[in-house]
Image (cartoon, rainbow, N blue to C red):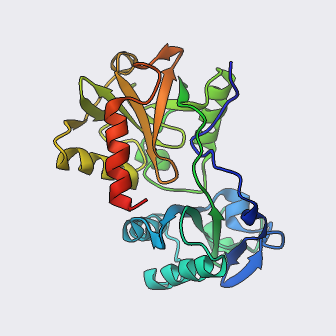
Amino acid sequence: MTDNVSTHEAEEDRRNADILIWVNGALTHRAEATVSVYDSGFMLGDGVWEGLRLYHGRWTFLEEHIDRLFEAAKAIDLDIGMTPAQVIAALEETRTANDMQTDAHARLMVTRGVKRLPFQHPRLSTKGPTMVIIMEHSKPKLPRPIRLATVPHLRGLPMTQDPKLNSHSKLNCILACIAAEKAGADEALMLDVHGFVNTTNACNFFIVRKGAVWTSTGDYCMNGITRQKVIDLCHANDIPCYERNFSLVDTYGADEAFLTGTFGAQTPVSEIDGRTIGSGEMGPVTTRLRGLYKDLVGA
């Protein structure tokens, strides 16, 4: 059995040892960049975030990411305290300070801020919000396709924790990932509340059957920006694409499977629950979509 990998494997880059991190308006060397132990994000996972990719001086799908950040903040009643234009300016300030031009990844995080007492009520967050931008030189490097294992952890109903939120509260997905690693896989394939194939712990999930691309209905998964771009590319390039319910039987019999996400774009899947998917390598439809997406983002 080869070593485990993740969908976020990146090449080592020595420049990251000296990156500057944006914390509440100040740029600080990574060794000194800190937040309070009373911060709502650290204490309770009370916050939202976005991941963005930089290609040739341009943040890919920037408007969609900023819109999603503000939508998520509104959903949890968190006042970011900045306009979208000011958030973009902070992102650009961080990029310029780190002299990043391409193949960079930014994690933009906003929490409810520092609490007066170490308890959960939002009104105890009296100093905030806290905003952090971590930006790294980051080029994906996946040594092989990903192996998945189906786990009992579900991406659940909106009345528990809405899976469409990019929330700091990621424990459900972390537990799913741990279960998959215990089963000898790299990451977890998660079902929805009806038992249909849904998503992974970190990415959106697609299969290919007889030249057609299938993905979940989207009712119980992150409303992934890369997911939607792949769906749009299929429609624009005469690749049949269906958002539908499908089972593990359909999945095991697929010709190809791949994941989508901001970091890895389209990541091939070789194995699910010990079953080889297709040839076990990246298939022709996935390869074509990767090329179309690369052209779209100008990578």
Which of the pair 292/108 is nearer the observer? 292
Q: Residue at x 73, y 71 (%)?
A: 19
Image position of 249 (left or right of 265): left
User: Where is residue 72, by image quadrant?
Assistant: bottom left
Q: Residue at x 73, y 60 (%)?
A: 43
Residue 82 vs residue 290, the one in the foreground: 290
Q: Position of residue 58 (x, y in %)?
A: 45, 72
Q: Quadrant of the C terminus?
A: bottom left
Determine the image quadrant of residue 168.
Answer: bottom right
Residue 295: x %, y % from top left: 34, 56
Q: Along the line of sight, which residue is nearer the eye, 78 or 281?
A: 281
Query: Across the whole image, how many numbered discs are drawn on residues?
Result: 0
Residue projecting furthest to the right:
31
Q: Quadrant of the N terminus?
A: top right
Residue 244: percent from the left, percent from the top?
Answer: 26, 33
Q: Is residue 196 above or below residue 279?
A: below
In the foreground, 222 or 163: 222
Q: Position of residue 163 (x, y in %)?
A: 46, 47
Q: Residue furthest left?
A: 238
What's the residue at 58%, 65% (across, down)? 106
Does residue 176 appear in this view? yes
32 to the left or right of 23? right
What residue is at 47 percent from the left and 65 percent from the top? 55
Q: From where the camera sits, is residue 152 visible?
A: no
Judge whether 60 appears above or below 216 on screen.
below
Q: Is residue 84 above or below residue 284?
A: below
